[in-house]
Image (cartoon, rainbow, N blue to C red):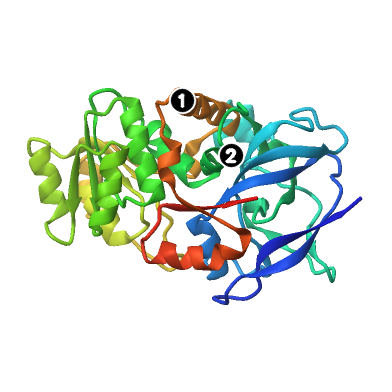
Amino acid sequence: MPRTVQGVVSKAVGEPVTLEEIVIPDPGPGEAVVRIQACGVCHTDLHYREGGINDEFPFFLGHEAAGVVEEVGAGVTEVEPGDFVILNWRAVCGQCRSCLRGRPNICFSTHNASQKMTLADGTELSAALGIGAFADATLVAAGQCTKVDPAASPVAAGLLGCGVMAGIGAAMNTGGVGPGDSVAVFGCGGVGDGAIAGAKLAGATTIIGVDIDDRKLEWATEFGATHTINSNDEDPVHAIKALTGGNGVDVAIEAIGLPHVYQQAFKARDLAGTVVLVGVPAPDMTLELPFIEVFGRGGALKSSWYGDCLPSKDFPMLIDLYLQGRLDLDRFVSETIGVGDVEEAFHKMERGEVLRSVVVF
């Protein structure tokens, strides 16, 4: 029988979010209803509220979540009721040309639940990243549920559902950081600190955090940065080269999404080095680079979407590292809040006061 929950909805561009009654249908074939235990307040949710993703209002916000499967539809074999899961927004199809070539992490036909969740009056909702998790239950495609060790804290585990995974994967998967490498991360928020943590896990020996906020640079050090640079105080390109024998870094990760910062990352890498863009640019932004340097420096310029992760592989592995004390997911959590506090959490995020506010149910 369909259930009604209180969830966070964005009804119009830039307007404060509101708590609304949301109807969750019974799961159909290939779908699951998940009882949400915790959901992080991610910058992507703010992008939705500001109209930066699309204009398909109203949006049911929240996506960086963990919880327990309550009910599954016909044909579901991946999970069963009682499973502790992290929700992901890339349920792979297994049939597209990328999946058939053994590259499911870049599946070209990921999918969400077929049914729509609605407001009490029947208005269809657009679920953020196909999830919608600022409520105590949601409907997703079963493939969006990744089973992990239930010993993990839901508050910490849910962060792998988006921002932290994007950062860790930008370093370990897209950037291919390895033992002895040097890495610079531009932007030390949640995604950037995830990249720093990923670089440390991968064995990088020089990890440089770059930001304009000294508080964020302190956070970067806590996650494993060996050096920090306030780019308001000094030229980050010159400072990075000074820290790397005049050469630049092996991997430069841009975790903000600003053209001028990407240019800094491009200039701060060593010959044959790699630049990874994991920050999300605005649709109207453009980038200009000296074309001869794109050729002459060699190496690679890469974009990282969701950290190029495969949730079925990466989530359980990272949770194991968390439980072993080798990946400090708890450190990303600045505060736990109620579902009615999401709008204020957005403002704290904009002011740079928090890494992650996490809604708990």
Circle 2: element type: helix
Neighbour tally class for label 2: few under 14, some 14-19, many 20 plus, Cα within 10 Å: many
Can residue 304 be seen at all in this image of the molecule?
Answer: no
Foreground: 291 or 192?
A: 192
Q: Nearer the viewer, mark 2 or mark 1?
A: 2
Quarter of the view holding residue 339:
bottom right
Neighbour tally class for label 1: few under 14, some 14-19, many 20 plus, Cα within 10 Å: some
Question: On the image, numbered disc 1 is attached to which residue?
Answer: 321
Question: On the image, numbered disc 2 is attached to which residue?
Answer: 154
Horizontal and vertical percent position of residue 48: 56, 64
**Is 4 positioned to the left or the right of 37 in the image?**
right
Q: Amino acid at mark 2?
A: Pro
Horizontal and vertical percent position of residue 202: 34, 26
Report the residue that reaches farthest toward the right.
Answer: 1
**Is 163 positioned to the left or the right of 240 in the image?**
right
Horizontal and vertical percent position of residue 18: 65, 71
All told, the count of numbered labels is 2
Residue 361 disc label = none
Query: In the picture shown, does residue 66 fall above or below 287?
Result: above
Can residue 166 be seen at all in this image of the molecule?
Answer: yes
**Is 214 positioned to the left or the right of 112 in the image?**
left
Q: Residue at x 41, y 60 (%)?
A: 281
Foreground: 291 or 148?
A: 148
Q: Amino acid at mark 1?
A: Leu
Return the disc, 2 or 1, that comes first in the chain's sequence.
2
Q: Residue at x 25, y 39 (%)?
A: 225
Circle 1: element type: helix
Q: Residue at x 59, y 49 (%)?
A: 39
Q: CA distance from mark 2 to mark 1?
A: 15 Å
Q: Residue at x 22, y 53 (%)?
A: 264
